[in-house]
Amino acid sequence: MFMRDKSLSYFKALLLGLLVQFGSASAMAGQADWTEFKQRFVLAEGRVVDVGNGGISHSEGQGVTMLLAAHYNDQKTFDRLWQWTQSALQVRKDRLLAWRWTTKQGVSDFNNATDGDLYVAWALLRAADKWHVPAYKKAAEAILNDVKRLLVKPSKWGPVILPGSAGFEKPAGQIVNLSYWIFPALNDFSRYAPDPVWDQLGESGVAIIRESHFGKWQLPTDWVQLGSKVTPAPGFPAQFGYDAVRVPFFLMWGKKANANLLAPFQAFWGYYQKTPYLPPTVSMENDAVAPYGAAPGILNIADLTCRYPAVAPRPDYPINTQDYYSATLLLLADMMVGEQAR
């Protein structure tokens, strides 16, 4: 018995050592990716440049990068990002953010983009918890109070999130973007800024996703209208594309996923994983797919979705070859995998 216990202790110690080594190697790789991301997309003043979108800056990019800075324990970069975001984008009469900024005009659209507001508030709450800075939490709460006041509206599915304060309430029904239901953020809002509405929004998002099945593959479109039923939104391309690819990802990260919810995404991506390329978009009108392959950020989400409920680290897609959007998807997926592994 003594020898058997000794052997078990040895193997437990060996396994623990391997896990520590793997965790250390993963952390080192993550820090290297974060350093590369900053060098490519973050300017000295704290402005995030979307190099794949004409070099503009937007509230989503600021918020996502603030979230990554908190994750990688980089408070110096976080503060630069937040200071630029406040001075350049938090210029409306409320505490929401103007969504678009260009070098020629400064703010070129004063409407907000709600996903950007949610990312910034989420990042501030996580940073407040990590670095014990009450001012971060106060700023997050101010944003979230205006989200609730101006952007959360009733519907037959429960409260819904308007994509912006202007332009999305139509006579035929509200227009929403399902990728703005950032389920892991809603979970953290319930934890750090408690209000029943965050859980209610989680429930309504799942309910609308359940009814957003269009075309051959029964996938959601990037934009949907909430009338008597859920339909593709008029005035927007009726496609499953660069926005909606985040829907299964946020379902998994926010622990809302199940086999039924993920089945359409797994069927579509599983089919194209066996073909020469996996397309980033598919039309819900004629089922035509893009004639080119998706970037690694989307390929990685497709792989995570098809593996569900298993979770695995991503393939070695170099950050230095990605545009802004693909790089953010890769690093956000690394965050999700790391959090679920813990």
Image (cartoon, rainbow, N blue to C red):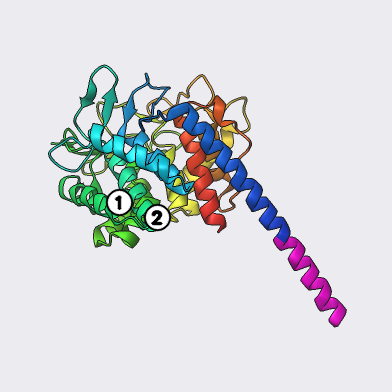
Which amino acid, mark 2? Trp
Residue 136, numbered circle? 1
| 205 vs 290: above or below | below
Please tell me in which quadrant of the rendered image residue 229 appears. Answer: top left
Q: Residue at x 41, y 39 (%)?
A: 77
Is any atom of residue 247 visible in this view?
A: no
Part of the protein shown in magenta? 1-16
Q: Residue at x 28, y 42 (%)?
A: 117
Structural crowding at the residue carrying mark 1, measured as other residues with C-alpha within 10 Å and reported as few (<14), some (14–19) or many (≥20): many
Callout 2–callout 1 Cβ contact below 8 Å: yes
Name the residue nearer the viewer: 249 or 103.
Answer: 103
Residue 298 position, x and y percent, is 50, 34
Say whether residue 71 is left or right of residue 300.
left
Q: Is residue 41 magenta?
A: no
Which quadrant: the N terminus?
A: bottom right
Residue 131, numbered circle? 2
Q: CA distance from mark 2 to mark 1?
A: 9 Å
Residue 252 position, x and y percent, is 47, 50
Name the residue nearer the viewer: 313 or 36.
Answer: 36
Say whether residue 138 is left or right of residue 18.
left
Name the residue nearer the viewer: 73 or 282.
Answer: 73
